[in-house]
Image (cartoon, rainbow, N blue to C red):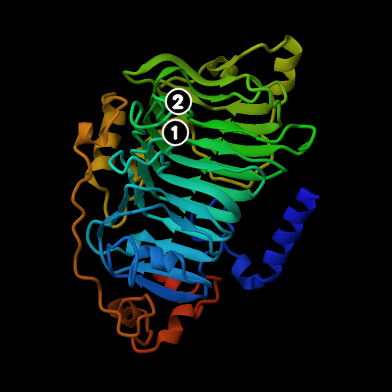
Amino acid sequence: MYRSLVIFLAICATVLIPETALSVPAFPGAEGFGAQSIGGRGGKVLFVTSLDDSGPGSLRQAVETDGPRTVIFRVSGIVALKSAIVITRPYITIAGQTAPGDGICLKNHALVIAADHVIVRHIRCRPGGQAKAESDSLSVSSGRDIIVDHCSASWSVDETLSASSRGLLGNVTVQWCIISESLHDSIHHKGPHGYGSLIRGSFGNGYTYHHNLYAHHHARLPRPGNYVDRGRDPEGFILDFRNNVIYNWAGSAAGYNADGSNGTNSITKMNFAGNYYKAGVNSTGSLAFSESTTSASAWFSGNCMNGSYPGDPWSLVSFSKFSDEDIKAYKQSSPIPAPAVKTDDAITAYKRVLADAGTVLPKRDAVDTRIVGEVRNGTGKIINDEQQVGGWPEMKSAEPPDDSDKDGMPDDWEKQHGFDPDDPADGNADTDADGYTNLEEYLNSTKP
């Protein structure tokens, strides 16, 4: 019954989406399970003009507005949240790249995605421990057709950038993000914590994590799995995890699946392809993954450990309480089917991710610059408090560009491309009929 309801709701949502809006990816370069998100395409434009937690011009007000919408920033700086911002209304694009100056950073609490067709780009989420909240930095908890691109997540008390649900979440991509410095021995009620990503799903749903940088986490790099036992969910969950860079985990293995040891024995199908692993000062071993779940299966190919490709790709995986037959069934000789991602070899991915991951528009901040330097140089360590590394850097604002008709496109850009800066209707037009609105062309730095 539950499975049928999920399918029915997904079909209903699709019926309401214009066919042309589904014909192109969320933006050029969007890949994986979440690539077809339409976000706020064709909807209203909302402006963030205030760094207040709530009220007129705030990010929270924009998130809580109904209907398709694109969020444009007219200010840069740090937003000190009084509670988590939870996206529950569908069809939204949050365009952090539009912030004038140094960009946007959220502190104290998490950004949570719990809606269909969400696009979040170039946002920093750095909660820290000051608010005494056991918070992730950025969490995807429910909804379908979601993509998180070029975001920076750090200083969480729990996991840092997770996508996890008991069947209410599907078609998710997390790409080109920096996921760093979870707080290990902070305020979590369980004691020492501080993890990378909990990535869990079920009922045939799939998520893609690609070209992300993980640095300085105790574990869960990642922790995939499925909350639903195989008796109720014979389809299982699919994770496509490729071209990620993972640096300085604690213990012997970067990631693990514990569904076997906790008795779930659910079905999880995984690709680990072209990932670059680099041990750091807190690492005591050089394993990519530890597996305890005999009902899981995986394809491991092209993964690199400390600059070298092992002769046997499975030498990077340890198995707990597996028979020879269990191991044979677990190891897949070809990839688990998943939406296409342009895949680099691991060493090329390492170079590209360090150059371009995280919130790079309008510019990289001091935190991400430091993290990338530590990965390159093999320095840095797991931390317990954000003040150990200087806390939040200042985010300076600048004068936003003139936008006379308030359609989200600057006047100068409109004139350059032959549009009328006094006509608000041309923002949602598609002049070159490529499936992207003129506003999206501006946001994507493409030619309309």
Q: Quadrant of the C terminus?
A: bottom left
From the viewer's perspective, is 201 left or right of 12? left
Relative to 346, say whether 359 is above or below: below
Task: Decide if residue 271 is on the left or right side of residue 111.
Answer: right
Q: Whole-Å distance between the Cαs marked 2 and 1? A: 6 Å
Q: Is residue 254 above or below residue 214?
A: above
User: Which is nearer the eye, 183 or 98?
Assistant: 183
189 in relation to 396, above or below: above
Q: Earlier in the sequence, mark 2 or mark 1?
A: 1
Q: Residues within 10 Å of mark 2 (few under 14, many from 20)?
A: many
Percent across and percent down for residue 368 are 28, 41
User: Which quadrant of the view contains residue 292?
Assistant: top right
The three-letter amino acid code for the residue at tag 2 is Ala
Specify whether 2 is left or right of 85.
right
Q: Residue at x 79, y 53 (%)?
A: 4
- Tally of numbered tags: 2
Tag 2 residue = 219
Q: Is residue 447 visible?
A: no
- Does the residue at mark 2 contact the one at mark 1 (Cβ under 8 Å)? yes
